[in-house]
Amino acid sequence: MILKTRLFGKSYQFKDLYDVMAKANEEKSGDRLAGLAAESAEERVSAKVVLSNVTLGDIRNNPAVDYEKDEVTRIIQDAINEKIYAGIKNWTVSDLREWLLDENTTGADIRRISRGLTSEMIAAVAKLMSNMDLINASRKIRVTAHCNTTIGEQGTLSARLQPNHPTDDPDGITASLLEGLSYGVGDAVLGLNPVDDSVESVSKILKRFQETKEKYEIPTQICVLAHVTTQMEAIRKGAPADLVFQSIAGSQKGNEAFGFNAQTIEEARKLVLSDGTSTGPNVMYFETGQGSELSSEAHHGKDQVTMEARCYGFAKKFDPFLVNTVVGFIGPEYLYDAKQVIRAGLEDHFMGKLSGIPMGVDVCYTNHMKADQNDMENLSVLLTAAGCNYFMGVPHGDDIMLNYQSTGYHETAALREMFGLTAIKEFADWLEKMGFTENGKLTSRAGDASVLLG
């Protein structure tokens, strides 16, 4: 590999492939914090030029973390379809980009080729793409999954109903839950982040969710986003669960910092398939976010886009129903402002879909970040154009338990109306039956939880 070039009257040389990969990234405060970022726009462009000429074979032969030392690398490498890989290994990263964006390349074509791509290849091509490129390529790719219902179908936009409460009070949770349902939110999952990670508390909330789902005959999924081991214990003690959740990282060391490994996830998957309450076969829910590996000193000196792509390679092994990047949650140390959050959201969504997983985005920011709700609405519109599977639904976009800002109940309804989309079919039919929508449009009953209480 030639890792040098001359541009702008100056020579640029890079020490190895991952120096090129890091410096080819669009500006990210996390890469700068890690000492990996390009020193100038000129150096960034030079790194992109060098990366464009690297072959996919070169990247496969140089994984971000050694195969022998890291189970995430082994999962990614061992999943490759060798026949498909053999047909593309001599492509350059530039060739892959041009092929993805070619108007004659279909979603089916991309899904096939994706089986021959490692996560590092996917990260590399994302670095060569503009924001519009990321949207254009993403919109071609459709990835569906089935738990109790099917997410990701053409013409749909889904939402997780996130009724978080600062004390896990079941009545407070239920109030947010019913309001969200009345706005058409919750077809992806009824999913709460608990304050109390105990088996008892998690079981209590799962039972309330199940009671609500059964009482109103709601066609959806339920999940409490506690640690995977807490959820497993709750299921073993008889708690209902359609999905099992876990935050994941792009390295074995990062996952160990979260308190699990691949064996834990596989055990959880088998448990919920045998003892859970959903139809399946897709019963896992994963969340990610650029910078998490750096925050736990588990990035192995690699940039945050590359490590994020590896999360999706890990997630794919377990056939998830839901995956989303919580894109702006980790803070300005990793994504400094709205421009960086928007870029990361488009990158993550593209990389997830190209990896072959059903991808959503928690379009969000923290209050100490240089961003506001208008910026998040901009990203929501861009991601809807890109074919994102689902967003979050938080009361008024303000999560009073996690103390961050996300998308509210109204945003999903507005995006569906603007883009001519609906909820998952069974859920959309339920909304019509309950009178919350008519011909796919919200009625005057939207926001009136008394309809359900009555």
Image (cartoon, rainbow, N blue to C red):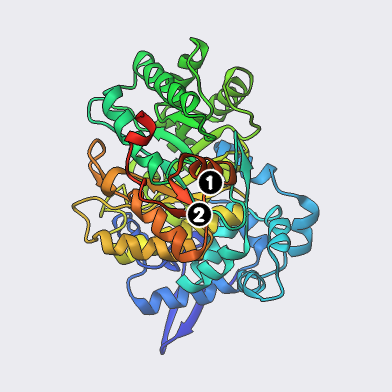
Instruction: Identify the residue position indicated by label 1 in the image.
Output: 428
Q: Helix, strand, or loop for circle 2? A: loop
Q: Position of residue 362 (x, y in %)?
A: 39, 49
Q: Are marks 2 and 1 in contact (CB under 8 Å)?
A: yes
Rate crowding at label 2 as few (under 14), some (14 to 19) or many (20 or more) other CA atoms within 10 Å.
Answer: some
Residue at figure coordinates x 64%, y 61% from the top left: 58
Residue at figure coordinates x 56%, y 66% from the top left: 125
Residue at far top of view: 237
Check disc 1 and give the amino acid type: Ala
Check disc 2 and give the amino acid type: Gly
431 relative to 140, above or below: above
The part of the image, by quadrant, that contains residue 11 is bottom left
Residue at figure coordinates x 44%, y 51% from the top left: 361
Q: Earlier in the sequence, mark 2 or mark 1?
A: 1
Residue 62 in view, yes or no:
no
Residue 77 in view, yes or no:
yes
Instruction: Identify the residue position indicated by label 2 in the image.
Output: 440
Task: Between residue 221 and residue 265, name the one nearer to us.
Answer: 221
Q: Position of residue 154 (x, y in %)?
A: 62, 57
In the rendered view, does 353 fall on the left or right side of 42?
right
Rate crowding at label 1 as few (under 14), some (14 to 19) or many (20 or more) other CA atoms within 10 Å.
Answer: many
Tell me the quadrant of the picture where the N terminus can be found: bottom right
Q: Position of residue 59 (x, y in %)?
A: 61, 59
